[in-house]
Amino acid sequence: LFFYIPSFFSQKYPPVKFLSEKDRKRILITGGAGFVGSHLTDKLMMDGHEVTVVDNFFTGRKRNVEHWIGHENFELINHDVVEPLYIEVDQIYHLASPASPPNYMYNPIKTLKTNTIGTLNMLGLAKRVGARLLLASTSEVYGDPEVHPQNEEYWGHVNPIGPRACYDEGKRVAETMCYAYMKQEGVEVRVARIFNTFGSRMHMNDGRVVSNFILQALQGEPLTVYGTGSQTRAFQYVSLVLLSAGLMEVNDVLQGNPEEHTILEFARLIKSLVVSQSQIQFLSEAQDDPQRRRPDIRKARMMLGWEPVVPLEEGLNKTIQYFSRELEHQANNQYI
Ligand code: NAD
Ligand code: UDP
Ligand code: UDP
């Protein structure tokens, strides 16, 4: 016996635009179950494309994309990009890599393999199927920069044997591979150098400054500032994924978020947004910690008309709400 269920009763997915077959692309997102990747998945799914997420769940989780599971345009594959991958796609957003210092330092050799062999495999795939590939690179390619602010022409200042090298040099060689495949094999590549990004679905315990400070402020623990707190970063809410999606259409290396703060200012800002009684505690400084970091975004403005859309405080408030809900969720589920 069959019942006809009208779609407005059965609708359980976020709204998806209809795209004709000629406009609909088959898109691979590696690392799509992670923080940035899952937001990109949402954007491209809602735009009406077919999205395949490939992830080994090292730092990502199914929960980040579970709202798409079962949708006819969506596929989730448990796969490690260090192994070759044979599928048919039109575009590749290559994000697979641990991103926070504690995560990428946890197994430096695996971080190197993911960024080198993993990227080589995705470029080999792009070459075979004629797909365009966007690499999620990082401001870490600039190391501890001697030029400020950093524009896309700067070559960087990285310690090749320091504790951050597995990630920094891994991403640098990943960029090199992209351009070698472009020059030698005609693969169309784009590189997005992402600066410090935060927002919902970032891991609460990944040890990054945003997650640490918010968690500490919510739990009334001291906010741990490494060193004097005079080092700076430029933070950007995760709506930055829109920049990556836009970049897929233009041929270049680009970067986004321009709002620079010292870490101490940032600690005070989070304390006041959470309305927290926490103290600020100074710990010893991290080795090879970049001292100043802010992108020069003139090129992104010029080529894409890019402007960061969500102001810092608004983005932080959203993230604080997300973390509060996660803490509640954890408290309610601790006996399951
Ligand atoms: P994340 O850890 O949330 O996401 C990375 C994803 O890649 C995870 O889902 C993880 O399971 C997956 N992954 C890792 N190794 C893999 C492998 N070998 N095979 C398959 N999947 C693998 O981190 P994120 O913050 O979302 O970062 C995404 C990308 O953006 C990374 O490439 C990162 O280097 C880059 N990036 C992020 C930031 C930031 O501030 N978040 C800044 C600069 C660059
Ligand atoms: N590769 C892949 N999927 C493909 C095509 C290639 O994973 O669809 C991998 C392949 O295993 C190889 C890498 O990408 O190790 C680079 O491929 P390329 O064709 O450039 O090099 P070759 O196979 O000639 O060494
Ligand atoms: N940091 C800090 N306290 C923390 C975590 C980080 O003072 O609990 C500092 C860290 O030393 C660095 C900055 O905050 O100067 C940003 O660190 P994060 O790990 O978030 O990112 P990255 O160093 O990769 O930019």
Image (cartoon, grey):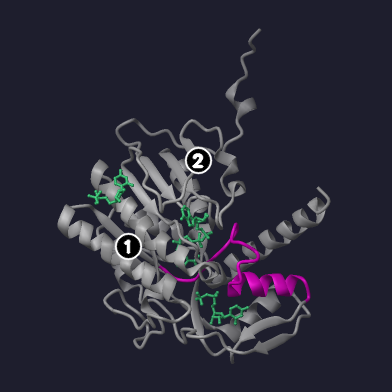
330, above or below 159, in the image = above
Q: Position of residue 145 (x, y in %)?
A: 38, 84
Side (left or right) of 246 relative to 186: right
- The residues tagged by marks 2 and 1 sit, at their Cα atoms, a distance apart of 24 Å
Q: Name the residue under label 1.
A: 191
Q: Position of residue 100 (x, y in %)?
A: 53, 69
Amino acid type, mark 1? Val
* Identity of the residue drawn at 42% across and 33% down: 18
309, above or below 259, in the image = above
* The residue stretch that appears in magenta: 194-220
Amino acid type, mark 2? Leu
* Identity of the residue drawn at 77% across and 71% down: 219
Q: Residue 292 carries which label?
A: none
- Give the camera-side residue of 260 and 184: 184
Q: Mark 2 points at which residue?
A: 76
- Membership of 218 in magenta stretch: yes
